[in-house]
Each structure stands twice: as C-alpha cells, then as structure tokens.
Image (tube, rainbow, N blue to C red):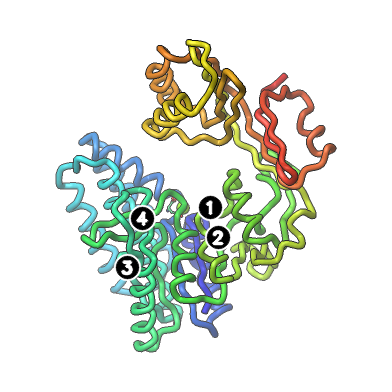
Amino acid sequence: MKVFKFGGASLKDAESVKNVVRIVEKHKKQDLIIIASAMGKMTNAFEKLIAEFRGQTSGVAKELESIRKYHTDIISKLEFSSDDVHQHFESHFRKLELYLEGMPADDYDFDYDQLVVFGELFSTTILSAYLNSKGHANQWTDARTLIRTNNVYREANVQWEKTEELCQRAWNSCKENGMKILLTQGFMGHTRERNTTTLGREGSDFSAAILAYSLNADSVTIWKDVPGVLNADPKYFSEAVRLPRISYKEAIELAYYGASVIHPKTIKPLQNKKIDLFVKSFLDMDAPGTQIDSSTFSDSLVPSYIFKVDQILVSFTPRDFSFIAEDNLSELFGLFAAHRLKIHLMQNSAINFSICADYDKQKLDAILQSCKENYEVLYNTGCELVTIRHYDQETISRLLIGKKVLVEQKSRSTVRMVLQDA
Ligand code: ASP
Ligand code: MG
C-alpha cells in the first residue's frame, strides 16, 4: 500500500485536479491511501472568514460567497456529471453556514478548528467524486473517524493507539467494500468528544505519516510543486539543487532548522517503522524526486542552506549586574512561552542572554513591557538567520559578502549565523 499526499498547490484549479487523477491512474494497480489538503490558498481564505466571524462583521457573507464560488467554479470546469458532488458539497456547505449563524465560542482556537477544515472537506468531496467519475472507485472517509487527538485546538497531539485502531478498521471496511482507494482529508482530527481539531498549519504531510504508520504502508509520497527536497529555497538561492536521497535524520534536521519542504513532525513516525518517504513533483510525475530513508551515506555530499529573514536579535542584561543563571532564564522563558514566542537560536554570556526569533512587533513590545524593570534590553531588527548543514569555509565566506555577523554558532556539521547588512 502507498500513501499519497496532495497539497493545496496540486489542487488549485480544475486542470490540477485532472493532473492528480493522471497520477492516481498511473498507480491504479496498488492499494492507495490519498490525503488531500484544502484547494489552492483556501486555508488562508478560511482564516479571513474566521476572523470576520469572530469579529461578527458584515464581511462574513462576502468571504463565504467567494469560497463557495471558488469551489463551484472548479466543479463546473471539471465538466463531469455527478449528482453526488453537488449534494455532498451542499451538505457540507450548509453545515458551515449553520456554524456561522451561531455565536463565536469563548475560545478562538476552538472556532478556528471547527471552521477551517471545511477547506479540506470541500476539496476531498470534489476530488473523490471526480475520481469516481473517471473509474477510480474510492471510499471518501471523514478524517474525524480516523485521527484521534487531544483537545489542544490548532496544535493537537495524536493519540496513536486509538488512531491505529480507527485507521485499521476504516481500511478493512474499505477492502470489504471492494475498494482499493481510501481518500481522506489532511490536517484534521477529532477529540474523544467528537470535536474537530487540527494538527497545525501545513499539517497534511503529518496526516499522511500518521496513516502510513497506522496502516504499515510501504511508502509515502508527498506530491509538490518542486522537484523534491532542495538544498536551499530557490527564492533566496538561485543555485539550489535537488537532494536525490537523504536520511530521516537529515530530513528532521533540515525541517527543524526551518526548511519548509516537509512538515517537521512527518518524519519521526515513518522513521520508527522504516517507511520510505518520497517527495516528488506533480508537474513531472516520473522524475525521481527525493527519497528519504535510513541510509545516511549521501547526507553530507552537498551543503544545505536554510534562510530565515525578517528576524530579530534581542539581548537581555539583568539590571542588577547579576550573572545570567537559572533564575533569570526561567523568568525569561516563562515570558516567551506566555507570549508564544518561538526561539530559533539562543546564546548567553556571563551577563547577557540573546535570542533570535521572527520579528513580531506586538509580541516584542509586550515582552519588553513585562521585563523592562529587571532587564536592560537591546535589539536589532532586519536580521537574517542562516543555517548551513555540511558547510565548508568557502560556502560561509560566499554568504558573508556585504554582511556583518552578529552571532555565530558552529558544530561539526552545522553552522548558524545571525547576519545583518554591513
Ligand atoms: N490546508 C492546511 C494548510 O494550508 C493544511 C495543509 O495544507 O497541510 O495549512
Ligand atoms: Mg495547504
């Protein structure tokens, strides 16, 4: 059995839906689990809708209408006859409207999860019906009958044992119905109380890994709009090249440092069961892409670069001239956690502690406000955090042209630098 994951970019219009069907067609001999995200940039559209709903503004109707039109346009451009697709789409849409007719819940994150997943429900409804019409019978399955989580909305944790049991039950019933394809939504799960949860933005890759793990799949393929895992983001680095094969460990490191190609949580479950992961281009389905497995031999063949821009470097010095020690650190970390500030790099000396994080003015102001009595705080905005895996001196020197190094951290395999224009 193979698990295929199709993200928003691979389902952004009627043409791309047809392309997904061509990919499925090529693999029709095997059992397939298909995980799909919301179409195109629909999750962003839902985020806007949710904000309007929470603010109880008149913008709700307009957002809703544009979401509706986006999907019905795709359905009509696919030009296929299916009563099911209209009926199923309308039934989901009605549930969405009903939720929006109610009052917002106390908890923003709760509302977010109940609403945002309609993007995935619409997308899989359309894809399922279209696949059926092309002779690829599939079992549309609500991911809320598969993935069981705790109730941390927007960042739910998977309850693995229950999830395994639910996935196996669903797959068995799929087989009993004579189906070779189970099709479901990425990104979403459910609590024991049947509330909807999500696994965090871009979480569909992780959903694919969860299903592969639970069903002991042979492999997972993430179909993307890039030729595989690249050694740098081509947006910042014109000479980016594809990495033909890397280890799970390398993939985890790259994702951890911020390479955006695979959701960081995806790798671990696959590594535990030694399930191969492929990252391939949906635009060139026969190209080899990147293979991720246990073998580490080619990890260090080319350096990889991860750039994070619009960073801030903040340093805290205790006003009472005390050394930086456990008590100051726990106070500062308490503040960061309270303001949900994610730290990308940190460093301390005797009397100061520095962190690098995404620049978010609101969060920064709030943190400064809370700690100004006890700490003198200095900060630089407009920084760039560069991580190089498997670096050599030449690659570093090339990157430093016209830059000033504010912080540098080196291990044997990785160098990380906070840079600013000189
Ligand atoms: N649709 C969700 C998002 O855009 C999940 C995903 O695409 O992985 O974040
Ligand atoms: Mg997406």
Residue 8 vs 376, above or below: the answer is below
Residue 306 vs 283, above or below: the answer is above
Q: Which residue is disc 4 drawn over? A: 119
Return the disc, 4 or 2, that comes first in the chain's sequence.
Answer: 4
Q: Which residue is disc 1 drawn over? A: 264
User: What distance separates the C-alpha of mark 2 from that of mark 3?
Assistant: 24 Å
Q: Position of residue 152 (x, y in %)?
A: 32, 49
Q: Which residue is disc 3 drawn over? A: 142
Q: Amino acid at mark 3?
A: Asp
Residue at point 34% right, 79% down? 169
Q: Amino acid at mark 4?
A: Gly
Q: Amino acid at mark 1?
A: Pro
Between marks 2 and 3 in the image, the one whose residue lies nearer the viewer? 2
* Residue 159 in view: yes
* Secondary structure under the numbered disc 1 in the rendered image: helix
Q: Are marks 2 and 1 in contact (CB under 8 Å)?
A: yes
